[in-house]
Image (tube, rainbow, N blue to C red):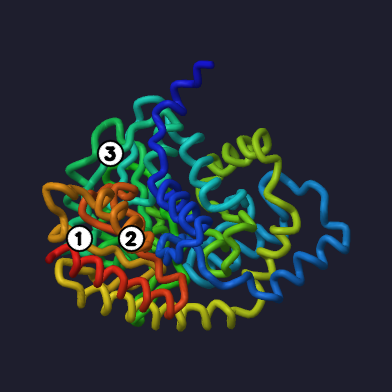
Amino acid sequence: MKLSKRVETLTPSTTLAITAKAKELKQQGINVISFGAGEPDYNTPEHIIEVAYQSMKDGQTKYTPAAGLPELRKAICAKLKADNNLQYEVANVCVCSGAKHALYNIFQVICNPGDEVIIPIPFWVSYPEQVKLASAVPVYVEGIESNLFKITAEQLGASITDKTKALILNSPSNPSGTVYSKEELEAIAAVCVEKDILVISDEIYEKLVYDGTEHVSIASLNDEIFKRTLVVNGVSKPYSMTGWRIGYVAGDKEIINAIIDLSSHSTSNPTTMAQWATLEAITGTQEPLNEMVLEFDKRRKAMVDLLNQIDGISCAMPTGAFYAYANVQELLTDDVKTADAWAAKLLEEANVAVIPGSAFGSDIHIRLSYATSMKNIEAGIQRIKEYVEASNK
């Protein structure tokens, strides 16, 4: 059977390949330490679980509007006002089956064949694939490591053509953990307004910031950029609700209405009881989140400090998310030429799983998640150190 051309353009997921190999080794009884997780290692807070359970007991098991529960959309508006100084009406918000689904829907409704979408490198693995699925063209702009992997307004301006439809901005970033400052965002916003392009602002890691870093939504800077920005967020990362699959997008009513129409013909609505759980996550106690951030902060410092003690590895201290993005270029050889090959040998010989940078647009970096125990961090990086020292002999 011949598949559609759109799926033939997709690149297999490096993340899934490494994860599958790690699981295979574990099933063989091998003690694998994995730093691949893109989700918190905490369970969903109990008060959120209880609300979901009670909602089902109360009969909340039927369809909701395609855009989501009115109560939840109203709560999202209140959250965006309180946390981000963004003033939206309920009609400006659509709840989706995860932030990934929100992003997918955005590209489907804004892109035509041949449109260009600017994607900074390093990027989250699904951005290019979702752009291609919308028959648009990814245009890559490299964030320089010395600038903590952030692109500049000058780089952005130079990459815009008459085919450019949008810029994807992910702050805090997966995989680098970098956070754009207000001043950097103001410069980028000025270019987007001048060139009249959309900004898709993926803010899913908004709550996971450290060292007094301030998360600023680019949409909050002025009225002109506000009109051009689609804000994407959700509960997966801050409330450890990755499996609940609830995210949302807020923005221009015309675009939101198109997303609602698309959702009505694809998912019908996000899972009902998960929406009630999300309402509790947003409006209920934030103490579990605060405790998780404190613990992630400790792990972040430990992981980066340990990585930088290994000859040949360098890693900037991330200020957001729960990833360390390490440079392994000095460890590459004629036999092991890329981070992919290096990560494969690390898994095979040291039983440590990391995600190679090709998943994010780089051949010389690896991503490690510190959403795992301190015990795993210390043991896993010790294995990496021993592997590197043995390889250098």
Residue found at the very far front of the displayed protein: 29
Residue sitting nearer the eye, 91 or 309: 309
| 178 shown above or below 153 | below
Instruction: Give the secondary structure at mark 3.
Output: strand
In the picture, the disc for residue 187 is none
Q: Dots 2 and 1: beta carbons under 8 Å? A: no
Q: Which residue is drawn at 38% across and 31% down?
A: 136
Residue sitting nearer the eye, 318 or 197: 318
x%, y% of residue 14? Answer: 38, 46
x%, y% of residue 130? Answer: 44, 39
Residue holding disc 3 = 139
Going by the image, does 48 lie left or right of 344? Answer: right
Q: Which residue is drawn at 68% across and 60% down?
A: 72
Q: Can residue 18 be seen in this view?
A: yes
In the picture, the disc for residue 328 is 1
Residue holding disc 2 = 367
Residue sitting nearer the eye, 299 or 252: 299
Instruction: Give the secondary structure at mark 1.
Output: loop
Q: Give the residue type at disc 2.
A: Arg
| 321 shown above or below 164 | below
Q: Could you classify mark 2 by the number of other residues whose Cα lies within 10 Å: few (under 14), some (14-19), or many (20 or more)?
A: many
Image quarter in which the C terminus is found? bottom left
Q: Could you classify mark 1 by the number of other residues whose Cα lies within 10 Å: few (under 14), some (14-19), or many (20 or more)?
A: many
Image quarter in which the N terminus is found? top right
Q: Which residue is drawn at 46% across and 60% down?
A: 38
Report the mark closest to the observer, 2 or 3: 2
Q: How far is mark 2 from mark 1, CA to CA?
A: 10 Å
